[in-house]
Image (cartoon, rainbow, N blue to C red):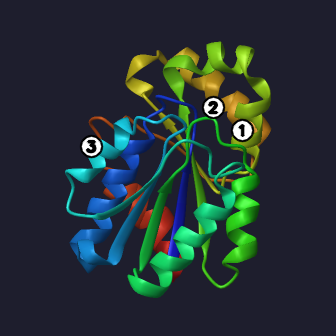
């Protein structure tokens, strides 16, 4: 079972990117081999309504964060999915406020299942967010296995280069790819970074 965790602040484009990967994987293996876990902090699961319209098995964890208040429930849900649905892929969208301890929780409880932590950076709001919540953004980027700088169509080249420099300073090891998730198909990204990791 392959586990892909999507992290990034609220509004960075996690749901769009996650569905893009789900559709890419399903073309090769069928939607039944992909399970999506959606975590929302509040009682209203907005993104879950979007995901429920897809052909994928979807589980929603609301009223708490999988990194803290829902940690036990999250691990139980993952184990239940692994045992009963036996998917090849579990795609997890963490709440935008999730602490990166969730990476350790997954790796500790599912040691035999490879995990990729995909962090999505919002190019349009990088400076504003980095100034107001530097600890959260720094933790997300530092723990990333793959960094997608999203909404590059919303900034000019000078601003984009500045963001790339900031992000690269925080994590120079993870592949860094610039995207516009609302318009890009991203198949090349998944083939190059996610699928090739399995080979």
Neighbourhood count class around disc 1 (C-alpha, 10 Å): few under 14, some 14–19, many 20 upward: some
Residue ID for mark 2: 164
Neighbourhood count class around disc 2 (C-alpha, 10 Å): few under 14, some 14–19, many 20 upward: some
Apparent side of residue 153 relative to residue 77 in the rendered image (left or right): left
Residue 20 spot, x, y in % from top left: 32, 52
Is residue 4 shown above or below 185? Answer: below
What residue do we see at 70% from left, 56% from top? 102
2 or 3: tag closer to the N-terminus: 3
Residue 145 spot, x, y in % from top left: 65, 57
Residue 23 spot, x, y in % from top left: 26, 61
Could you give the CA–CA distance between mark 2 and mark 1, rounded to whole angstroms? 6 Å
- Give the mark count: 3
**Disc assigned to residue 36:** none
Callout 2: SS: helix
What residue do we see at 56% from left, 78% from top? 79
Residue ID for mark 3: 50
Is residue 106 shown above or below 66? Answer: below
- Mark 1 in CB contact with mark 3 (< 8 angstroms): no
Callout 1: SS: helix
Q: Nearer the viewer, residue 43 or 157?
A: 43
Residue ID for mark 1: 168
What residue do we see at 42% from left, 38% from top? 179
Residue 120 spot, x, y in % from top left: 54, 40
Apparent side of residue 46 relative to residue 131 in the rendered image (left or right): left
- Mark 2 in CB contact with mark 1 (< 8 angstroms): yes
Q: Nearer the viewer, residue 86 or 163?
A: 86
Q: Nearer the viewer, residue 102 or 128?
A: 102
What residue do we see at 52% from left, 28% from top? 122
């Amino acid at each position: 079972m392959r586990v892909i965790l999507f992290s990034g602040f609220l509004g960075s484009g996690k749901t769009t990117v996650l569905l893009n990967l789900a559709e890419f994987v399903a073309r090769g293996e069928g939607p039944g081999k992909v399970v999506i876990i959606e975590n929302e902090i509040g009682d209203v699961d907005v993104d879950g309504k979007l995901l429920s319209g897809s052909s994928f098995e979807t589980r929603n964890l609301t009223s708490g964060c999988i990194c803290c208040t829902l940690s036990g429930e999250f691990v139980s849900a993952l184990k239940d999915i692994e045992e009963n649905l036996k998917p090849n892929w579990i795609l997890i969208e963490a709440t935008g406020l999730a602490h990166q301890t969730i990476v350790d929780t997954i790796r500790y409880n599912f040691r035999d299942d490879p995990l990729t932590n995909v962090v999505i950076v919002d190019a349009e709001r990088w400076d504003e967010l980095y100034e107001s919540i530097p600890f959260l953004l720094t933790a997300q980027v530092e723990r990333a296995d793959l960094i997608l700088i999203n909404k590059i169509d919303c900034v000019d080249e000078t601003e984009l280069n500045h963001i790339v420099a900031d992000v690269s300073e925080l994590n120079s090891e993870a592949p860094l790819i610039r995207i516009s998730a609302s318009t890009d198909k991203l198949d090349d990204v998944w083939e190059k970074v996610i699928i090739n990791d399995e080979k």
